[in-house]
Image (spheres, rainbow, N blue to C red):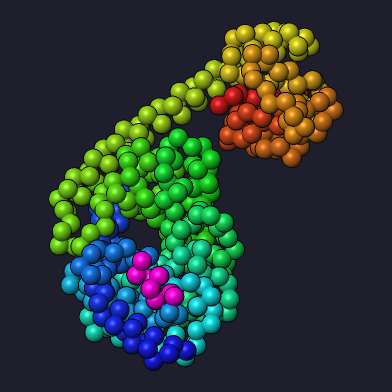
Amino acid sequence: MLGFMEKEILTSVEEKIGLLSYFQPIISLKENKIIGYEILLRGIINNQLTSPKSIYNIFESNSEIIDFDFKVIKHHLKEISKIYNENYLYSINLSFPRERLSSIDETMLRLNINEMVEKVKEYKMCTENIIIEISENEIGSSIQQINFVKQLKEKGFLIALDDIGKNNSNFSKLVDLKPNILKIDKSLIKDIEKSGYKSSIVKNIISISEETGSIIIAEGIEKIEELEKISWLGCDLVQGYFYSKPMEIEEMDIKNIVSKIEYGKNRIVKYIDIRMKQIIDNEIMFNDIITQAERTFMLFGNEFSAFAFNLFRKFSKIEAVYLLKENGVQISDTFLNKDIEINKNKIFHPAKLGDNHDLKEYYYNLKYKNIYISDVYISKATGNKCITISKKILDKILCLDIKI
């Protein structure tokens, strides 16, 4: 409990803080337009623009962070009402830490949520247009926190889980909170076009969202290359400095943002054209490899080693060749291309004569088709990224690993 003097000082400080709502557009790449805004807090203390972190530190130190956070939300709702459009989404960030939320009185929490709803009605808006963002790093899985999110959803608010992929993300929270939106943290977006690791993580997050019925928003888009990559991975909604920094709505240059949206669309289309051409070229190459491999295999007959080395000379991207029986058991050694770099450790080693492959996708898929081209995976033989082409030839299955 704050002492009288501390309370008086806190009130005095609060009165001197001017609250500002800064808006940053959220863009739909598929619809090619602005579909909403994230509303971010800025403050003025002693006539100086101040970061939200500095403001929140004042109230955090006085244990009044939750009361202040709800005041910020009400302020944002008032600012949203000035530009409200029922076809747009408006995203507001909650910043109070998990330990405060875990200990808050549920009656007080309910009263604050009800007051938020009343403010939305007063401004003739709908809760269905309002997103409440909760940081993935700040929310836990306590009963109070789950009930808090549940109450917001019951009132019609959309819930976004922010900072996905930042620090030690815990995807089990998705099960408890069932958010409507997942916001991928900018740390995963930065230079994503240069990082296979980041691309794989983001692709998996997008896959998770598809399974859970959540929508993805990628934050922190700052350059066109990041936009191209994130679009290719399947993300529709984006925001970031590439389009606009957060700013007061009356200062926002909508014409320039629309121009950036159009430029981004044209670059994405060109990027997709290039990637699709690569895919088609690869398919042509794979078909050529398997056609020539089949002919060469029939020519060499039982001389499988001679066949393998002849194939390596023709196609430098082939890194491994091996032969299976119809039941999936390997009936040849795995022949490796000596010109392909191999990761030598205990994890990676080529399959041997007699090994069973009947649980490998390039085997069991041949039950339904005569030829199969796998997705990209890490080869257990070499440690490289590769695809496997498998083909039924007479009573045998020819397998070719192609380095990607």
Q: Is most of the magenta stretch helix, strand or loop?
A: helix
Q: Nearer the viewer, residue 155 or 115?
A: 115
Q: Is residue 159 visible?
A: no
Instruction: Check residue 346 for magenta coloring.
Output: no
Residue 8 falls left or right of residue 48: right
Q: Is residue 76 visible?
A: yes
Q: Position of residue 215 (x, y in %)?
A: 42, 59
Residue 355 drawn above or below residue 115:
above
* Residue at the spot 32% in from the left edge and 63% down from the top edge: 51
* Residue at the spot 76% in from the left edge and 37% down from the top edge: 358
* Residue at the spot 75% in from the left edge and 26% down from the top edge: 350
Instruction: Check residue 56 for magenta coloring.
Output: yes
Q: Nearer the viewer, residue 58 or 269?
A: 58
Q: Position of residue 16 (x, y in %)?
A: 25, 77
* Residue at the spot 31% in from the left edge and 70% down from the top edge: 129
Q: Nearer the viewer, residue 398 or 334?
A: 334
Quadrant including the C terminus: top right
Residue 112 drawn above or below residue 141:
below
Residue 262 lies in quadrant: top left
Residue 103 drawn above or below residue 162:
below
Q: Nearer the viewer, residue 247 or 82?
A: 247
Bounds of the magenta segment: 54-61
Residue 361 lies in quadrant: top right
Residue at the extreme front = 5
